Amino acid sequence: MGTIENNYSGGNQYDKRVDPTVERGAVTDEIPTRLLGERASESFVMLPFRRPEVRKAHFLEAFDRSTEDMAILSFGKCNLACPYCKRDGQFKGEGNTIIKAQEYDWDFVKSTIDYSLNKGRRIRLSGGDPCMFPKESQKVAEYVRDTYDQKISVAHNGSSPSFLKKLLPNLEYAAIDIKGGSPEELAYRAGTRAMDRSVDRALECIELCASNGVLVDVRTCVFGDTSYDELERIRDRISGVDGVENVFWTLRKYNEIEDCEFVPGDPDKIRSYAESLAAGANFGIGFRDKWTGTAFQIWDKRQVTDHVGTEGKILQ
C-alpha cells in the first residue's frame, strides 16, 4: 500500500525527521520516527501526529480509581460517517480512509508506545475506529502486554462485538458509544442507513466488556434536539446489561463543528437531564461539557454530584 494522499494541514501533522536511534524504554521529549511516507514492511494507517494526543480517563473516579492519562493512537478509517466527528471521520477517500490519514511503520508506532508508557500513560486505541484494523490493534495490545505487562484501553463506536471479544484479555477499560436510542436515531447521528440491530450491537459490546470485568465508559453525544425520553430509553437499556456494576455513562455535549447541521445542547438542561436520569439508574452517570476547565461532573448511584477538573482532582 502506498502513501495515502493527505490534504490535512493541521498543527499535529508530523512533517520532519527526528532521531530514529532512541532505544526502546528511553524517555525522551522527541518520538523517534521514520519520515512519513517511507515504505515499510508493515504500515499503520493513522491520523497524523507528532506526539500522541493525551486525554484523561475521568470516568475512573466513579470507580474509586485515580484518573489516568491516556496516549491516544487514532486509526485512520471508520465504518461510520458521523457529521460531528472532531477528527474529520466524515471526510473519506477510498476504502473508508479518512482523507488526512497517513501511513506509519511499526517501528514508529512501537517507539510511540514506548515513549508514552514510560511517561506513565495508558495506551488507548481510537480513531476513526480501531475495529477497522483488528490485526494492528491486536499487535499493539500484545506488544504492550508482552513488553510492559500492561493492558490497553480502546474507544469503539459500538458496531463490532467480535472485534472487542478478541481484544478482551488485553483490555483494562473501554469507551463504547451509543449514539441513539433507536436504530433510526443512531443512523441519523452516525451518517449511515438504519440497521435493525445497531443499538443491540452497542449494548452487546458494553455487556461483553462489563461482564468480563472491563470497566466501560458508555458515551452518548447530546444535541439541542436530543429528548429526555430518548436518553431515558438508553439508560433503561444499559441498566439491563450483565456486569452493570462496571458501567459508567457519559453524556457529552455536542460542541459545534463547522458545516454540521446539528445544534449544541444547553449545558444546564443536560445537567438536569443527567441528575434526573441518575435517580433511576443502577450505574454512575457523568456529563462532559468541554475538554478544558472543570468540565466533567459525576452523579453516582446515590445522586452525589462531584466536579472533576482537568487534573482529575475532585473539586468541592
Image (cartoon, grey):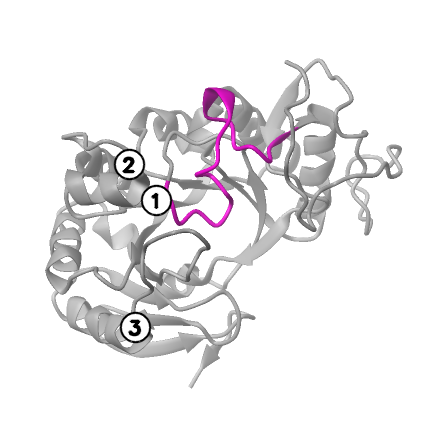
Give the residue type at disc 1: Ile
Frontmost residue, 222 versus 105 = 222
| Residue 243 tag number | none
Q: Is residue 162 left or right of residue 86?
A: left
- Is residue 219 visible from the viewing direction of this image? yes
Q: Quadrant of residue 295?
A: bottom left
Nearer the observer: mark 3 or 1; the answer is 3
Residue placed under numbered mark 2 in the picture: 205
User: How many other residues sit within 10 Å of disc 1, few (<14), some (14-19) or many (≥20)?
Assistant: many
Q: Is residue 182 left or right of residue 84?
A: left
Whole-percent x, y for residue 33 in the image: 79, 34
| Residue 176 tag number | 1
Q: Secondary structure at mark 2?
A: helix
Q: Separation of disc 3 and disc 1 at Cα?
A: 24 Å
The residue depicted at 69 percent of the width and 32 percent of the height is: 110
Q: Quadrant of the C terminus?
A: bottom left
Q: Separation of disc 2 and disc 1 at Cα?
A: 7 Å
Magenta region:
82-102
User: How many other residues sit within 10 Å of disc 2, few (<14), some (14-19) or many (≥20)?
Assistant: many
Q: Separation of disc 2 and disc 3 at Cα?
A: 30 Å
Whole-percent x, y for residue 144 in the image: 60, 34
Frontmost residue, 140 versus 250 = 250
The answer to if 131 sits in the magenta stretch is: no
User: How many other residues sit within 10 Å of disc 3, few (<14), some (14-19) or many (≥20)?
Assistant: some
Is the C-beta separation of discs 2 and 1 under 8 Å?
Answer: yes
The residue depicted at 55 percent of the width and 56 percent of the height is: 55
Give the residue type at disc 3: Asp
Residue placed under numbered mark 3 in the picture: 266
